[in-house]
Image (spheres, helix red, strand yellow):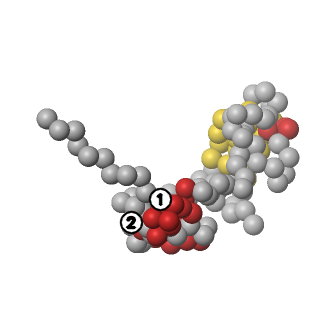
C-alpha cells in the first residue's frame, strides 16, 4: 500500500495571498470584519500578530490592594445582588449587570460595590 503524498508546506507569499475569510471558523462575515479592525486580513498577519498587553492571571490580589486603572485578578465571592426587577430580561456580555452588586474577599475582609452602568 502506497503512502499518501503530503502537500508541501505553504510559503509566506502563499499565506499572505490567502484571506483570513478562507478559514472555516472565520468566513466572510462579522469575524472577518472584527479581525480587520486589528489589521488582520490574511494568514501571515494572523500568524504574526502578538497582543500588545495581557492580564497576568497568575498573580492574585486582595481587593484592598487593587488600584484604580490597573488590571488585577481578584478571587472573591458575590455577597449580594439587588435586582433585577421582576420580569426584567437583559443580556450583559462582558460587563457587570446594571443593578447594585457587592463582592468581597476573605483575605482583606474588603468589599466593593457597584451601582448602575459605569461611565
In this picture, is 4 found above or below 49?
Answer: above
Q: Circles 1 and 2: CB distance less than 8 Å? A: no
Q: Secondary structure at mark 1?
A: loop
Residue 13, position as x, y percentages in the image: 50, 65
Residue 6, position as x, y percentages in the image: 30, 47
Looking at this rendering, what residue extends furthest in the top direction? 107
What is the quadrant of residue 36 in the picture? bottom right
Residue 76 is marked as none
Q: Give the residue displayed 57% in from the left and 63% down from the top.
A: 45
In this picture, is 57 found above or below 26?
Answer: above
Q: CA distance from mark 1 to mark 2?
A: 16 Å
What is the quadrant of residue 25 in the picture? bottom left
Residue 11 is marked as 1
Q: Give the residue displayed 41% in from the left and 52% down from the top.
A: 9
Quadrant of image for the N terminus = top left
Q: Is residue 88 visible?
A: no
Residue 64 appears left or right of 40:
right
Q: Give the residue displayed 39% in from the left and 66% down from the top.
A: 22
Residue 64, position as x, y percentages in the image: 84, 38
Residue 50 appears left or right of 40:
right
Residue marked by disc 2: 22
Looking at this rendering, what residue extends furthest in the left direction? 1
| Crowding at mark 1 (Cα within 10 Å: few <14, some 14-19, many 20+) | few
Amino acid at each position: 500500500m502506497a503512502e499518501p503524498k503530503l502537500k508541501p508546506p505553504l510559503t509566506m507569499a502563499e499565506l499572505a495571498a490567502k484571506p483570513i475569510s478562507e478559514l472555516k471558523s472565520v468566513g466572510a462575515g462579522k469575524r472577518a470584519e472584527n479581525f480587520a479592525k486589528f489589521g488582520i486580513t490574511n494568514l501571515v498577519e494572523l500568524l504574526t500578530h502578538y497582543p500588545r498587553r495581557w492580564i497576568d492571571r497568575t498573580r492574585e490580589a486582595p481587593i484592598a490592594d487593587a488600584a484604580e486603572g490597573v488590571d488585577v485578578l481578584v478571587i472573591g465571592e458575590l455577597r449580594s445582588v439587588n435586582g433585577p426587577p421582576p420580569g426584567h430580561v437583559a443580556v450583559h456580555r462582558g460587563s457587570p449587570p446594571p443593578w447594585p452588586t457587592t463582592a468581597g474577599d476573605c483575605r482583606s475582609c474588603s468589599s466593593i460595590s457597584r451601582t448602575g452602568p459605569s461611565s
